[in-house]
Image (cartoon, helix red, strand yellow):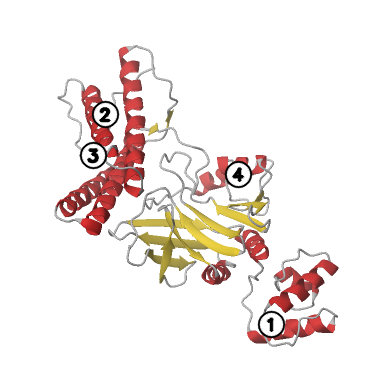
Amino acid sequence: MIVRPLAIFVALVFSAPSLAEENPLQSELDDIERQLVEVEALTSRYDGGLILGLIEARREALLLARTVVQNRINAEAGGATIEVVVSAIQTDERRAEQLLGEMAAAQERISQAESEAASSGGLVQALALSRLETERLTLAQLQMGYLQARYGIAFPIAQMPSEQVETSVIADEGAVEASGAEGQSVVWADPGFPNTDYTLQPFEQAHRDGHQISGWWTIEAERAAIDDSPQITAVNYSQYDPNSFTGLTALVARCSEGETAFIFVQDDFLMADFRRNSFDMTLRVDDEAALQARWSSLTSNKGAGLFGSEAEAFIRTLYDANQLFIRLVESNGQRHDAVFDLSGAQAAFEEVAGACGWTTLSLSSDDYRAIQTLLNAGGFDAGTPDGQWGPASQRAMRAYQASVGLPETGAPDRATLETLGLNN
């Protein structure tokens, strides 16, 4: 096997490899070791918190890079290799050049954060230090992405993430058809959505776990530990990249302990506006005009979301949509874009709405009043028809749903209204 020389770019200050260097790999390895010493020194300054978490994440990235570099050095020397499996992937020179530019921009943000941290104190300094470590981690991840694009190295990744940069891929029609055909060859493929690639690992895992699959969505049903209420977690995997070492960008629609959430998650540590604990968002549904919004930050610092009635309203907006564009903007101006294929969303949204007891239909007070009147006429006491869907209406609806063998959601959902003879 012919092994090409490899230069590892995980130094926090990036520099292109020189062909005149006698041993560029060893030089890169020495630089990684230097950075690890620096990280260890930083770690000792903190007992916990966000900054320590960022430093530790950076340390893990450097350790992985060191292993890969040492593995290549050993291979070139004919020695034993370290036990790490690294797949080869297609190189992408255009993507590599793009990442070089992003790395330069990240280095500039690091310099700015260093200056701010050095010239401030108290809370302002703490925020500057958080931003500094966030940018350092981002740079390390960008540099590992550069390795993938430039040299075709796929770093080892976890197959199931807990929760990046916009790319455009133009595929010929034949390739798309071939991919779709392959995606339908597995037993868990949803025939209703033939363009989904069901060979991706999350779908195989969902099948093994007995979860529902609908288009690009997996739907997990369980019971909340605190009160045994129905809990639904639906995840959209249309942005899944099996070669991404930093994690997965995804949409999550969820009902947990009676509260609905709609969340955009990705694997970068994000810097929110600490004054409002939220992010500026740009959203575009299909070909409608883009809208500006603010979404709440997550405790994991790896995404943003809507909760409660705001999440319910947004899910109703998406119910008949085919595509959602999302742009999240950090407080430092860094953008995170993603375009999601919503195929299969209706089944996911109905499960979430049913578990949390609301309807995906946009109903007016007059609509609710008419439904209450029908329930009363059928012997299911919804109280005085007032157009407000309260506890009495929910109890009456659950009783009716039980009588006709429907899930007892207590909400005037589409299936229930159909049995009542109402067009939805």
**Which kind of residue does numbered mark 2 sit on?**
Ala
Closer to the chain start, of discs 3 and 4, is 3
Closer to the observer: label 1 or label 2?
1
**Which kind of residue does numbered mark 1 sit on?**
Tyr
Closer to the chain start, of discs 2 and 4, is 2
Residue at mark 3 to residue at mark 4: CA–CA distance: 36 Å
Under tag 2, what secondary structure? Answer: loop
* Residue 14 occupies quadrant: top left
Horizontally, residue 227 falls left or right of residue 279, namely right
Residue 12 got which mark?
A: 3
Residue at mark 4: 203
**Which kind of residue does numbered mark 3 sit on?**
Leu
Q: Dot 3 surroundings within 10 Å: few (below 14), some, or many (20 or more)? A: many
Residue at mark 1 to residue at mark 2: CA–CA distance: 66 Å
Closer to the chain start, of discs 1 and 2, is 2
Q: Position of residue 61 (x, y in %)?
A: 35, 36
Closer to the chain start, of discs 3 and 2, is 2
Closer to the observer: label 4 or label 1?
1
Residue at mark 3 to residue at mark 2: CA–CA distance: 14 Å
Asked if one can make out residue 41 in the rendered structure from this viewpoint, the answer is yes
